[in-house]
Image (cartoon, rainbow, N blue to C red):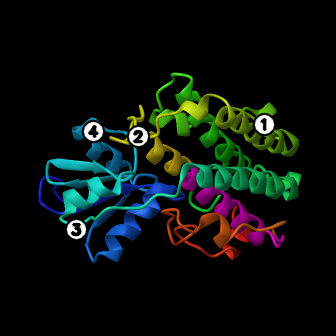
Amino acid sequence: MQASTTDDAIRVYWMTGCSSCLRTKEFLQKHGVPFLSRNVLEDEAAYAELERFGLKQVPIVTRGDAWANGQVLRDVARLCGIPYGETRMLPVPEMRQRLDAVLAGAARFLAQMPDAALARELPNRPRSFAQLGWHIANIADAFLEHEDGIPLTFDSYMRIPTEAQSGRAELVAYCEEMRVRLAAWFDGPGQSCDWSRRADVYYGEQTMHEFLERTVWHAGQHVRQLMWVLEGLGIAPDGPLGRETFEGLPMPEKVWDEADPAKLRRAS
C-alpha cells in the first residue's frame, strides 16, 4: 500500500542518471537524514504524487505540504532542518577554463565511441550513449540561450538529438562548436556580465555565478559518466579528466547510482 504523502516524512523524487538527483540523495545521506526514495522511472505513482505540487520535474524533496527543488541544496537544507553555511564558488575565469576542459574531454571521449555503441542505453535509464554526449554540449548551449534572453526551463535539459545529430562526427562537432561559441561569449558580451544578478532559471533563486557553476558541474558530472561508459566498454578514455577539472565544484561523489562499469557490458 502506498504511504500517505501528507505525513512529515521526507521524500526524494529522482531518476537514475540525474546528476542533481544523485547529489541531493548524497547530501541527505551525508547529514544522516532518512528519506523515502521515489524513483519516477520505476514507479508511475511517484510522478502522480508530485502533481499535487504542480510539479513534473526532479529532483524534488517534499516534507508534508512543503517542497524544495533538489538543485538548490540550501533550500533542501532549510526544508529538512540541516544547518547550511556559506559556500565558496570558484572564480568565473576558473569556471570558464573548467567548462572548456569538460567540453574538450567530451569531444575526445565521443571520438573514441564505437559506432555500434552509440544507440545503446545507460543502465536503468532511457538515455542512449549518443544522447548522453549530446546532452553535455546542450547544457552549455542552454547557458548561452539564457544570455540570448531565453529562460532556462526543465525542458531545456530534456531535449534529445535528432537522428542526423546522433552520429559520432556530429556529436564531436557539437562539443567543439560550443567551445568556440563560449569563448566568443566570454571574450565578448560576457566581459560585461553582472555575475551577481539573478538568473532566469526554473529551479529557484540563483545568481549568474551560481548558474555558471551549475552549468560547469552539471556538464562535468555527465562527462564523468561518459568516461565511465568507455571504461565499461573496455576502452581507456583518451586524456581522462580528474581532480584538476573537478576539484572545487559541488560534484556528486558517485558517477552513477550503480557505479559498476561492468553493468554496461550487460546493458542493452
Q: What residue does disc 1 label? A: 177
Mark 1: which secondary structure? helix
How packed mark 1 is, by other alpha carbons closer than 10 Å (few <14, some 14-19, many 20 or more), is some
Quadrant occupied by the C terminus: bottom right
- Circle nearer the viewer, 3 or 2: 2
Quadrant occupied by the N terminus: bottom left
The residue shown at (82%, 73%) is: 234
Which label belongs to residue 105? none
Q: Is residue 72 above or below residue 149?
A: below
Per the image, is 252 magenta?
Answer: no
Q: Is residue 214 above or below residue 161?
A: below
Q: What residue does disc 3 label? A: 83
> Main SS of the magenta segment?
helix
Q: What residue does disc 2 label? A: 196
Mark 3: which secondary structure? loop
How packed mark 2 is, by other alpha carbons closer than 10 Å (few <14, some 14-19, many 20 or more), is few
> What is the three-letter code of the residue carrying label 3?
Pro
> What is the three-letter code of the residue carrying label 2?
Ser
How far is mark 3 from mark 2, CA to CA? 24 Å
Mark 4: which secondary structure? helix
Q: Residue 130 versus residue 151: which sits nearer the camera?
A: 151
Label 3 with label 2: CB-CB less than 8 Å: no
Per the image, is 226 magenta?
Answer: yes
- Circle nearer the viewer, 2 or 4: 2
How packed mark 4 is, by other alpha carbons closer than 10 Å (few <14, some 14-19, many 20 or more), is few
**Percent position of residue 223, x then y:** 67, 58
